[in-house]
Amino acid sequence: MQTIVLGSGSPLPDASRAGPSTLVRTEIGDLLFDCGRGVLMRAAAAGSSAGAIRGLFLTHLHSDHTTDLNDVVTSRWVTSFQPNPLPLFGPPGITRLLHATEAMLELDIGYRMAHHTDLQWRPSADVTECEGGLVLEAGSVRVTAAPTDHAPVRPTLGYRIDEGDASVVIAGDTVPCPGLDQLCAGADLLVHTVVRRDLIEPLGLARLTDVLDYHSSVEDAARTAARNDVGTLLLTHLVPAPQPGAEDEWVALAKEHFGGTVVVAQDLLTLEVSRWV
Ligand SMILES: [Zn+2]
Ligand SMILES: [Zn+2]
């Protein structure tokens, strides 16, 4: 199983970091977690595509995690030569988001169906709204979800992907919480969104300091990893984005609380996840 960071950025546009999105490559295909800004450009670079995605899993409906859903829906539709419903999983609200996205695309859908005589079906999706538990099981792959805490955004989900003995957790945006602990127990890799409290707090700007109360700091994520005996902690959704060369600071902060491997994400970083490597 491979984990590929498609977007390591945050809501703030960044020249070298796409919006939040992670690809987990499994024996049953590519599983996509969130679809932030630029997701399909990065997916193309990783050898994937909208049409190839075996499942899109949304952690929550903040726009930075969903802004390119319209691109996934449209690109999957126009590049498939038979109906290819998008398997879409996420918290209650994803059906509403999908319908609103389709409504936004209505004119485009009409133009394309009128122009392409071989494209006589609309974009479609198989939607599974859930608040936790087993969400997908196929071959040796299991995806389970659990509630996280990103209040006032509710509900929000983290995911755990198990393939045989190997496991990856996608935390999404959350403060430390029991649901995330449950997913993380003994996981090989934890992909965790983080903010730098030590850099943001002194700014004293309410619009920025507001984000501190519903995100994990680097230290919080490290403590979650340590408490749950995680193998590797991958820090992503980096706020503020590190200046080139400053990644070691982030690693050092995490290392104060966690004895495992700490990695700072950049777009297209790829980690092999195996119990035996
Ligand atoms: Zn969020
Ligand atoms: Zn976010």
Image (cartoon, helix red, strand yellow):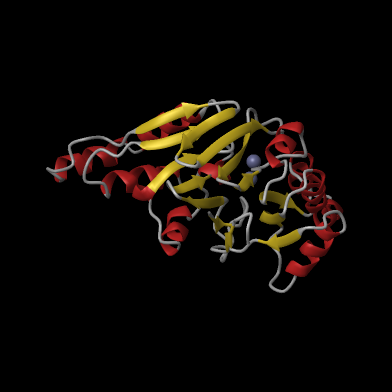
Nearer to me, 122 or 271? 271
Q: Position of residue 16 (x, y in %)?
A: 57, 66
Q: Which quarter of the picture shows residue 238?
A: bottom right
- Seen at 49% across and 34% down, the residue is 136
Ligand 2: image quarter = top right
Residue 105 lies, with reference to residue 36, above or below; the image says above
> What residue lies at 52% left-to-right and 31% top-to-bottom?
135
151 left or right of 51?
right
| Number of numbered labels in the structure image | 0
Compared to residue 173, the image places residue 275 above or below, namely below
Q: Residue furthest bottom?
A: 245
On the image, the x and y values in percent for residue 26 come to 48, 50
Quadrant where the C terminus is found in the figure: bottom right
Can residue 236 be seen from the camera position used here?
yes
Where residue 38 sits: x, y (%)? Answer: 48, 55
Residue that sits furthest to the left in the current view: 117
At x 68%, y 56%, the residue is 234
Pick whichever, 227 or 223, lies toward us. 227
- Residue found 56% across the figure and 53% down from its top: 19
Q: Is residue 150 visible?
A: no
Quadrant of the image occupied by residue 125: top left
**From the viewer's perspective, is 148 left or right of 196?**
left
